[in-house]
Amino acid sequence: MVNDAQTLENLHTETRSFPPSPEFAEQANARAEMYTQAAADRLGFWREQAEHLHWDTPFTEVLDWSDAPVARWFGDGTLNACDNAVDRHVREGRGDRVAFYFEGEPGDSRTLTYSDMQREVSKAANALESLGVTKGDRVAIYLPQIPEAVVSMLACARIGAIHSVVFGGFSSDSLRQRIDDAQAKLVITADGGNRRGAHLALKPLVDAALAPSEANPTEAESVEHVLTVQRTGQDTEWTEGRDVWWHDVVEPASDEHTPVMVEAEHPLFILYTSGTTGTPKGLFHTTGGYLTGASYTHRVVFDLKPETDVYWCSADVGWITGHSYIVYGPMINGATQVLYEGVPNAPHEGRWWEIIEKYKVSIFYTAPTAIRTFMKWGEAIPNKFDLSSLRLLGSVGEPINPEAWMWYRRVIGGDRCPIVDTWWQTETGSIMISPLPGVTAAKPGSAQVALPGISAAVVDDDANEVGPGRGGYLVLDQPWPSMLRGVWGDRERYEDTYWSRFKGLYFAGDGAKRDADGDIWLMGRVDDVMNVSGHRLSTTEIESALVSHPWVAEAAVVGAKDETTGQAVVAFVVIRDDSEAANLEHHEVAVALREKVKSEIGALAKPRTVLLVSEVPKTRSGKIMRRLLRDVAEHREVGDVSTLANATVMNAIRDNMESGKADDD
Ligand code: PRX
């Protein structure tokens, strides 16, 4: 719920405004008229955007909403995503343009042109076909941020197979859950990846995921092969008949392959994301509408000039940002990009700025968490590098606080680059709310306005639009081409999660406020989803990982404000009296619990703070009152406890927290 306190807290008035410079406005891809044009004829506007793609069979119908909330966009057209992202550029004489400057963490680099990409994806597509993968089959991809990740995704798209990329930071249990749910036929992985000078193993996690385990008594039945890229040269166990090396099957394959044209509504990919309840949801996107949204937004929001810009999105391809703004949007627009394998502080804290200097990056897209981390490290570090090539900066993943916005503008953008704060979600497929560079006067901390063609509203509990300065729920009230088409195999869950809260409106799960100018400010999730470093985590998922530890009787997890990561995971845990944990130091227990979460979900979900408590606060009907725990975790006065079954429980919890009994990572 967006409670009053939260609304009021965010009711500050932002008076700073950064109008576009006349020079930027003059050359911008975006035009103010786009808003009026799209408002006057929304479907005509989307038709025009879709016509930027190469269609094998041109569509005649724009939108069919008769099966709402499942949309059909451009339903009678056919096309291929890889053909649009790669072959088309070669066909039209752009084959020599660099598609990727790849920078490995150990310092190795590779340059791949669009012609190189065409050869690579063709070889990979032939190899996938030789492994029996065909149109409609699902392929799980569990790779580091290396060119083969992009090639694998595009090779799937080329043959009409549906990729499901699983971020390399997820555990083998999480990987297995996703493989089973999607019934993946093939897993593409690597022996390992590079992290801060060390080798991270990936293939052993795939082996563990596929093998019988405590959580899964049987082998993963759907998987026929594991295709493994050699990245680190680590020793790797091998299952004959199942495992194949990339260099044995992809390298020798023919570099000619004809893309398989698919219907516009053919699924392109599944991506799993945390929800409020149960297991992660397999959200899926289809081809024509998704590609329309990703390429249109990339063109206008990032102002891409493909002949001259060098674009870098620092996200991992394992997240939606990597799908839409590394692979599909930029490649369809013929962008030259940087792809970087590693972290920002290896081997030194200036690594990102060094990369920007080296490749003369002109457009840079990253997350507020990264910006706040750089602020902490100090501006002397970026100041050592020549960042004068930059001309536009983007932010995504979580609300950006005005201080971080101002720092980003001044220190990284030299006070000359427009900043686009882009609000969107895995579900929306592409950016929904953002300033348009060259058009919008930017306001630090606000994502501001729905893009032309997109219709957003902030509503109260009864679905009425709120007035200026009021908080409410963010909804999208018109279908859009890149909207998710559902939860894989579960239409009911799709309808329940997104369309039942407000009839006929897409409920995003975010709180928002309109200011006096009508600009939108995002205020964070209003459900039990946390946003840690721009990664979406579910409180209930982490709670169930904790209670699966034999020491744990009960657990309650909340997201608490954190200066760097936006939110941090704080766990309140009740230990069983009869367990050995009763005789251990608090810290030892906390370490073991963090390990448990890491092995069940992945390192990204590990609680920052663990507090052992004797009871968690519950209502008389047994519902955990996370609101009160959040007060404790954020060191605020504890709110109304009148609905608690045991009103005194909060005193003990608060006293323990305030007396420093919590274990911090
Ligand atoms: O809460 C919003 C937040 O991230 C959520 C979506 O997470 P995910 O599906 O993982 O996609 C992240 C990358 C698109 C949203 O519900 N969020 C994302 N961008 C912003 C944001 N919150 C505020 N401002 C943003 N620019």
Image (spheres, helix red, strand yellow):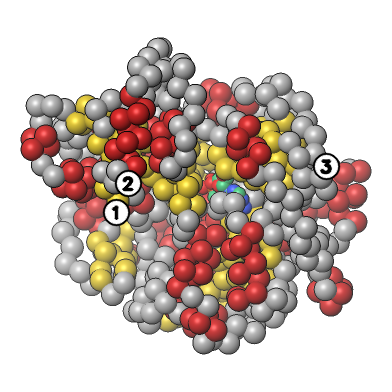
Q: Residue at x 55, y 60 (%)?
A: 368
Q: Earlier in the sequence, mark 2 or mark 3?
A: 3
Q: Is mark 3 within 8 Å of ligand 1?
A: no
Which residue in the protein does label 2 denote?
Answer: 609
Inspect the image, locate mark 3, and give the three-letter code of the amino acid beneath it.
Leu
Q: Earlier in the sequence, mark 3 or mark 1?
A: 3
Task: Report the Cα–Cα distance between label 2 and label 3.
Answer: 49 Å
Which residue in the protein does label 1 denote?
Answer: 665
Q: Nearer the viewer, residue 204 or 302?
A: 302
Proximity of marks 2 and 1: CB atoms separated by less than 8 Å: yes
Q: Nearer the viewer, residue 266 or 218?
A: 218
Q: Tell me: residue 396, above or below residue 376.
A: above
The answer to whether residue 449 is visible is yes
Does dot 2 land on a helix, a strand or a loop? strand
Which residue in the protein does label 3 denote?
Answer: 43
Label 1 Cα neighbours within 10 Å, binned few <14 / some 14-19 / many ≥20: few
